[in-house]
Image (cartoon, grey):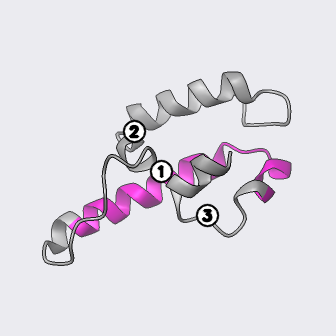
Amino acid sequence: FPKLSSTNYKSWVGDMRALLMIKEVWSIVNGDSVQPTADDKKELLEWKTKRGKAAGLIFSNLESDQRVHVKGFKEDPVQMWALL
């Protein structure tokens, strides 16, 4: 599907959400999955990996002129999604 541009938000948002669901990171983006405590190092590492994957997927599916909207939040997919 096309990257987010200034004219295709309505189609992009559905496609992007589906991709995030397929990649099993949607729960990170929508806030259902919260950061585990530091006590469980393995679970924390897995969560951080998924968080990075979600952020990377969102960022890589933005046209360059749309990336300004997430400036400063490239590692926070929850904020990225909210700003878009």
Left or right: residue 62 compared with residue 64: left
Residue 74 lies, in percent from the top left, at: 61, 63
Q: Secondary structure at mark 3?
A: loop
Q: Which residue is mark 2?
A: 23
The furthest residue to the left: 39
Q: Is residue 59 magenta?
A: yes
| Above or below: residue 14 compared with residue 51 | above
Q: Which residue is mark 1?
A: 54
Left or right: residue 69 compared with residue 41: right
Contact, CB < 8 Å: mark 1 with mark 2?
yes
Contact, CB < 8 Å: mark 1 with mark 3?
no
Q: Give the alpha-carbon distance from disc 1 to disc 3, as whole Å.
A: 10 Å
Q: Give the alpha-carbon distance from disc 3 to disc 2, as whole Å.
A: 18 Å
**Which residue occupies 85% across, 29% down?**
7
Residue 75 lies, in percent from the top left, at: 54, 65
Left or right: residue 60 compared with residue 9: left
Mark closer to the chain start, 3 or 2: 2
Q: Is residue 60 magenta?
A: yes
Q: Which residue is mark 3?
A: 74
Q: Residues within 10 Å of mark 2 (few under 14, many from 20)?
A: few
Mark closer to the chain start, 1 or 2: 2
Q: Secondary structure at mark 2?
A: loop
Of the pair 68 and 64, the residue shown nearer to us: 68
Mark closer to the chain start, 1 or 3: 1
**Which residue occupies 37% across, 55% down?**
50
- Give residue 27's mark: none
Looking at the rendering, the stretch of residues picked out in magenta corresponds to 44-68
